[in-house]
Image (cartoon, rainbow, N blue to C red):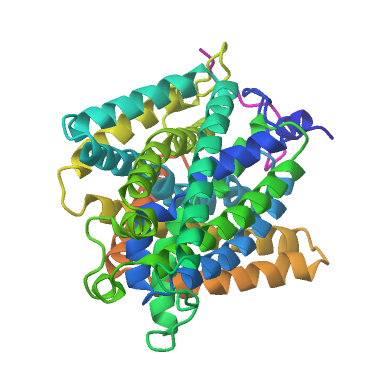
Amino acid sequence: MSLQDNLSRYGYRQELSRQLRFRDLSAYGLVYMVPIAPMAIFGSVYAGSGGMVALAYAIGVVALVFAAFSYAQMVKAFPMSGSVYNYAGRGISPPVGFLAGWVILLDYVLVPGLLYLVASVAMHATVPAMPVWLWLLGFVAVNTVVNSVGIRMTAAVTRVMLVGELIVLAVFLAVAGWALASGRGRFSWDAFYNSDTFTWSLVAGAVSIAVLSFLGFDGISMLAEETKGGSRQIGRAMAAVLILAGVLFIAQTWLAAMLVPDPGVLLAGGDPNGTAFYDAAAVASGGWLATLCAVATAIAWGLPNSMVAQVATSRLLYAMARDRQLPAFLAKVSIRRHVPINATLLTGAVSLALGLYMATRSDGITLLSSLINFGAMVAFLVLHVSVVVHHLIRERSGNWWAHMVMPAVGFAILVWVVVNANIAAQRLGLAWLALGIIVLAGLYLSGRRPALSGLAPAQPQARHVERV
């Protein structure tokens, strides 16, 4: 059965354009994750982990490999946009799917705003003559235009940007390695394990911060309706980019940890200005490397990373809207560009408004980061449960390893991380979930209880999606 037939089976027409191959998916995932992402939050993870920053990233890779495996299982069962929203809705029940979509909205809707804000603040520090709001407006405008043109344009732009990021990372790794070999810094394995500071709760709390760097591999699943070659390509791309990015994250943070000019001060005071990585780069070769890393990080977060984040967000809004669980105008698809145009424009507008507001708060970046991480990890927990319920219970699968052991281990690791996460993030995240429950109750009271096409014989017709 073709993917086109699969969509018809679930009550949908093929609205989006299938143009993406494995290399496009891999580039998309890497750009979304940002190979140099740890540069921006290195100091926070270093301080939060007691200096064991490489260990925090290593545990993050292990935890999310299980999530990638569960994604691969569910995308084969339901090869469509919507990610965890569809997997939980079809694998467990539509109301659970609605709540999963609501929780993951906390991740997907806030991510572009955070990325634009971080990039704009960094660029303002580099070019003070341009205010933060002007940088925000510029980044949002460029990305919204590119994403509105079509998925092929987005893929082409992100590939070019990815090459630039990898070049900067290669320069840092080479220069930092040479500096350590020349006697600058101090060779140590403390970034992986330090008996003086190690506690499991400390490391778990740091992992909850480090997870921010990994968010993006899951966004590949949002492109299931724009992919050539079948759902297997989605699973392969997710696993490949997660492992590759994990290796790059561990390598750069280990080298940076050995070059931190004053570890004691960083551990005691944290990194309120977000410059710890660039200070380490300056130890390696002076100001030029620090400036290169800072500017590259800002551009990476402000353009390619936020560009693909906007794509993922718009696909989630599109998927929920065509199921009438969000306003119908978000399901409109451009007949020329084959993109959910209204969802793309709304994502850009919300990101701009959110970025401008959070720029006025001293805790804006920290607050957004905590909320995003919490929403993502809760969504991953629901994903693991969906695998067990759909495959093992409903389909009576005999593959206990893939459909019970793997998701159970991944679930347990994530519970440990969530329990040790920032208290404020837990409270705000649970408040968002409570609001979602209230919205769900409102849908029931108004007679619009969540329902997904293709789940019952009474829904044989492909759902019409308005095109523009």
Query: Seen from this angle, which residue lies furthest front?
Result: 182
Q: Is residue 89 above or below residue 319?
A: below
Question: Does residue 82 show up?
Answer: no
Q: Residue at x 32, y 68 (%)?
A: 422
Q: Tell me which corner region of the image, top left, top right, bottom left or bottom right, holds residue 45.
A: bottom left
Position of residue 284 measured from the top left corner of the image (x, y, whole percent) = 39, 58
Q: Nearer the viewer, residue 49 or 353?
A: 49
Q: Is residue 13 left or right of residue 335?
A: right
Q: Is residue 393 above or below residue 245?
A: below
Q: Quadrant of residue 417?
A: bottom left
Foreground of the two, 134 or 64? 134
Magenta span has 458? yes
Q: Left of 399 or right of it: where is 119?
A: left
Q: Magenta stretch mostly in which secondary structure?
A: loop
Residue 312 sits inside the magenta stretch: no
In the image, which residues are magenta? 451-468
Residue 110, horizontal then vertical, whole percent: 36, 44
Residue 221 position within the rendered picture, expressed as x and y whole percent measured from the top left? 61, 43
Residue at image point 29% right, 65% down: 427
Residue in front for this viewpoint, 316 or 56 = 56
Q: Kindly identify the residue that appears in the image at 47 percent across and 70 percent down.
A: 56
